[in-house]
Image (cartoon, helix red, strand yellow):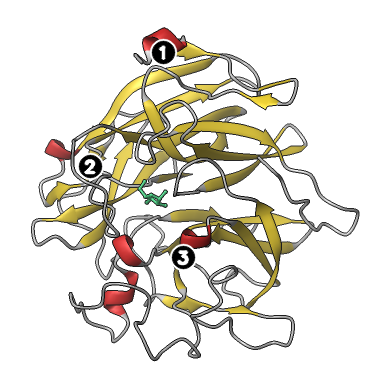
Amino acid sequence: ASLLALGGLGVQTGFCQGTSIKPLVTDLYTADPSAHVFNGKIYIYPSHDIEADVPQDDEGGHFQMRDYHVYSMDKIGGKVTDHGVALDVKDVPWADKQMWAPDAAFKNGTYYLYFPVKDKEGVFRMGVATSKSPTGPFKAEPKPMEGSYSIDPAVFTDTDGKSYMYLGGIWGGQLQRWHTGKYEKSLMTDLGKGHENEPALSAKVAAMSGDMLSFSEPLKDVQILDENGKPLLASDNKRRFFEGAWMHKFNGKYYFSYSTGDTHLLCYAEGTTPYGPFTYKGVIMNPVEGWTTHHSIVEVQGKWYIFYHDAALSGKTHLRNVKVRELLRDNNGDIKTINP
Ligand code: FUB
């Protein structure tokens, strides 16, 4: 079925209608939505999914994205505006292919777009591109961020103005290949057989330099502990980190959230500093349609929202559509599980 037949040409209004959550964008396939409020307006920085006829594999070869669009909304439930191509892989000198989940930040009058893309050796690196407008076009720096690897950057700016990047994704996101400190192509999935009772691979975090173009320190592990204060194990695939990190702060606490990948859950863990350690708290969202699940959490006019994707429009795991819904908490701040 043609996407156009499903409605929408660049400007849509999808939100909750009754119990059904409508896709925000229906004329392109979009995924991995990183949402931010800049100057009172909502901006969404998603991946732009395309059909490239590459067979599905555990390395995510079917995700062959080539550019990014930025979307904006004045309010949740309002019209969604597509601002066109913000960055194309052909304009990133060191990049080869697969522009995966991006994020954005604002500092010192400049907007920064952070994006993972494979370099010419097939290794995921983090790129950064800048613009004076939140919607781009963005100009890429000539080289990847020094010391960067893997995928799914999420940049969080704390209330003291300091910014941090969280990153990482296992399997296709290649995080396991960096386990020893250098790139080892043979490490395909998790840590491999015989390592099930070892601590799970961790997402990484580093503070950003003042110019937001590099890390100001080496990447550190984001530790997630269980209820007994022990690191989650590699075999604990309903709770361990897989990809899609996000950070938000609520009532002075730091909420690190992520996807469990092969068990398709969005989970969260709570800590008292941006570096953690974080204690596992629970499931934010049960599996959506499609293999991947990826989200962001943002406060808009006093309410909290989760932006996420599913594959409802296409029925194909690599052709996704972004959605938004309210995030609700108990009185103690614990996030209520959503059943999409
Ligand atoms: O969109 C490609 C990859 O799929 C992302 O980087 C992951 O988080 C998953 O959503």
Asked if one can make out residue 265 in the rendered structure from this viewpoint, the answer is: yes
Q: Which of 308 and 77 is in front in this view?
A: 308
How far is mark 2 from mark 3, CA to CA?
Answer: 20 Å
Residue tagged by mark 2?
64
Type of the residue with mark 2: Gln
Disc 2, ligand 1: is the CB inside 8 Å? no
**Dot 1: few (<14), some (14–19), or many (≥20) neighbours within 10 Å?**
some
Quadrant placement of the N terminus: top left
Q: Any mark on residue 192, and which?
A: none
**Dot 3: few (<14), some (14–19), or many (≥20) neighbours within 10 Å?**
many
Is 108 positioned to the left or the right of 251 in the image? left
Q: How many marks?
A: 3
Asked if one can make out residue 164 in the rendered structure from this viewpoint, the answer is: no
Residue tagged by mark 1?
10
How far is mark 1 from mark 2, CA to CA?
Answer: 22 Å
**Dot 2: few (<14), some (14–19), or many (≥20) neighbours within 10 Å?**
many
Q: Any mark on residue 242, and which?
A: 3
Task: Give the image location of residue 336, x and y in percent.
Answer: 78, 51
Mark 2 or 3, nearer chain start: 2
Vertical placement of residue 167 versus 87, above or below: below
Type of the residue with mark 3: Phe
Vertical placement of residue 48 versus 179, above or below: above
